[in-house]
């Protein structure tokens, strides 16, 4: 059986804590859903924030909802260079020891001490899909991308939850290098 699944490009974005959301947009503010994302319960918001680093600013970065316990800014390596911070490759949610940045919203600013990451490439599996594919949470796999610029992605993290929908995520830089199109089919090869 071929172990095929869809892949999607992940552009720069940020997740806000409720506390930081209210500093940036005002007391009692709630996120405004623009569109649902592939992962159940996750959505792109109308809200955008400027992210300011020592060297530059990324204007209008999209907020994803719902709010999380900690604010996290996900950028590519090129974005990190533009900001003037060191891109640290991390799993989503693992922000200890990462650089910070200033977030600027319409009502206020937040100086993050940590939280800027380059997200590790990963695959979301539901529990059922993980059983079908023979993988478990935190496994590392290789994924083959076909096409004219095809390649094999090493070090792809497996993330398993009953709340996930089957989908691989790579950042825009990686996806563009491989000629990836959203919802293209890729294959786990090892």
Image (cartoon, rainbow, N blue to C red):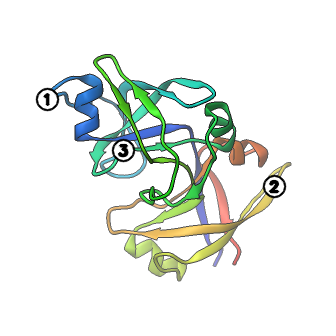
Residue at the left extreme, as displayed: 28
**Residue wearing tag 3:** 71
- Whether residue 51 is situated above or below residue 106 in the rendered picture: below
Residue at 45 percent across and 72 percent down: it is 129
**Residue wearing tag 2:** 150
The answer to whether the residue labelled 3 contacts the one labelled 2, judged by CB atoms less than 8 Å apart, is no
Pick whichever of labels 3 and 1 is earlier in the sequence: 1
Which secondary structure, mark 3? loop
Residue at 78 percent across and 57 percent down: it is 146
The residue closer to the viewer here, 157 or 50, is 50
Q: Is residue 30 left or right of residue 34?
A: left
Picture coordinates of residue 109, whole percent (x, y): 35, 25
**Residue wearing tag 1:** 28
Quadrant of the snapshot with the C terminus: bottom right
The residue closer to the viewer here, 128 or 97, is 97
Q: In this view, does 149 lie to the left or right of 17?
A: right
Mark-to-mark CA distance, 3 and 1 = 17 Å
Picture coordinates of residue 35, whole percent (x, y): 37, 33
Quadrant of the snapshot with the N terminus: bottom right
Q: Label 2: how many residues lie within 10 Å, few (<14), some (14-19) or many (20+)?
A: some
Picture coordinates of residue 6, whole percent (x, y): 58, 55
Residue at 51 percent across and 61 percent down: it is 91
């Amino acid at each position: 059986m071929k172990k095929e699944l869809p892949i999607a490009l992940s552009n720069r974005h940020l997740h806000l804590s409720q506390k930081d959301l209210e500093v940036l947009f005002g007391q009692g503010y709630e996120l405004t859903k623009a569109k649902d994302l592939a992962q159940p319960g996750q959505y792109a918001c109308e809200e955008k924030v400027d992210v300011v680093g020592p060297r530059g600013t990324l204007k209008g970065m999209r907020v994803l909802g719902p709010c999380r316990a900690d604010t996290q800014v996900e950028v590519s390596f090129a974005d990190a260079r533009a900001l003037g911070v060191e891109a640290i490759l991390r799993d989503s949610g693992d922000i200890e020891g990462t650089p910070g940045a200033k977030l600027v919203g319409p009502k206020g600013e937040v100086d993050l001490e940590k939280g800027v990451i380059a997200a590790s490439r990963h695959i979301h599996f539901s529990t059922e899909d993980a059983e079908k594919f023979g993988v478990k949470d935190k496994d590392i796999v290789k994924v083959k991308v076909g096409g004219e610029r095809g390649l094999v992605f090493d070090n792809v993290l497996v993330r398993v939850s009953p709340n996930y929908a089957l989908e691989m995520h790579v950042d825009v830089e990686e996806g563009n290098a491989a000629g990836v199109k959203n919802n293209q089919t890729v294959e786990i090869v090892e």
